[in-house]
Amino acid sequence: MADTTRITVTLPSDQVAELKKLTDNVSRYVAEAVARQLRHQLLGADLQRYQEEHGEFTEEELARARSRIFGAAGPGDSASAA
């Protein structure tokens, strides 16, 4: 079991009600959401540092990244929604 620290978090009542509909372990759900957000922020910082060192990403680099992430169809493509 990972080392944990008990904290108090205040959330709007409607959010708590929706959380309880989704999960019986609100602490785990919130911990996973926080971990996801931390990864997102760390990745953003890494990408920013890369661009500061190597320049802005080219359209070709961005297209290649989108293809690797979303596949050939890309995000929002009607073929991927079928």
Image (tube, rainbow, N blue to C red):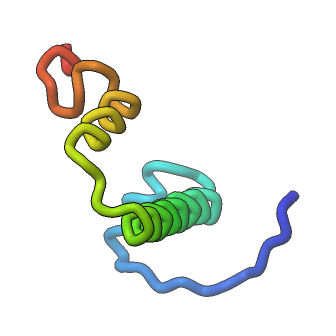
Where the N terminus falls, by quadrant? Answer: bottom right
Q: Residue at x 48, y 58 (%)?
A: 20
Residue 16 in view, yes or no: no
Image location (x, y in percent) of residue 73? 23, 20
Task: Tell me which residue sits at (32%, 33%) in the image.
Answer: 64
Single out the residue that lies furthest toward the left.
78
- Say which of 66 and 21 sits in front: 66
| Residue 58 seen in render | yes
**Left or right: 48 in relation to 46:** left
Q: Nearer the viewer, residue 48 or 3?
A: 48
| Image location of residue 57, percent across then percent down | 29, 53
Q: Report the residue at 12% width, 20% height from top.
A: 78
Q: Is residue 72 above or below residue 14?
A: above
Total residue callouts: 0
Q: In the rendered view of the protein, which quadrant contains the C terminus?
A: top left
Q: Position of residue 71 (x, y in %)?
A: 33, 23
Q: Quadrant of residue 62?
A: top left
Residue 72, picture quadrant: top left
Q: Which residue is at a point 35% across and 38% down the rendered structure image? A: 65
Residue 36 placement (x, y as % from top left): 52, 58
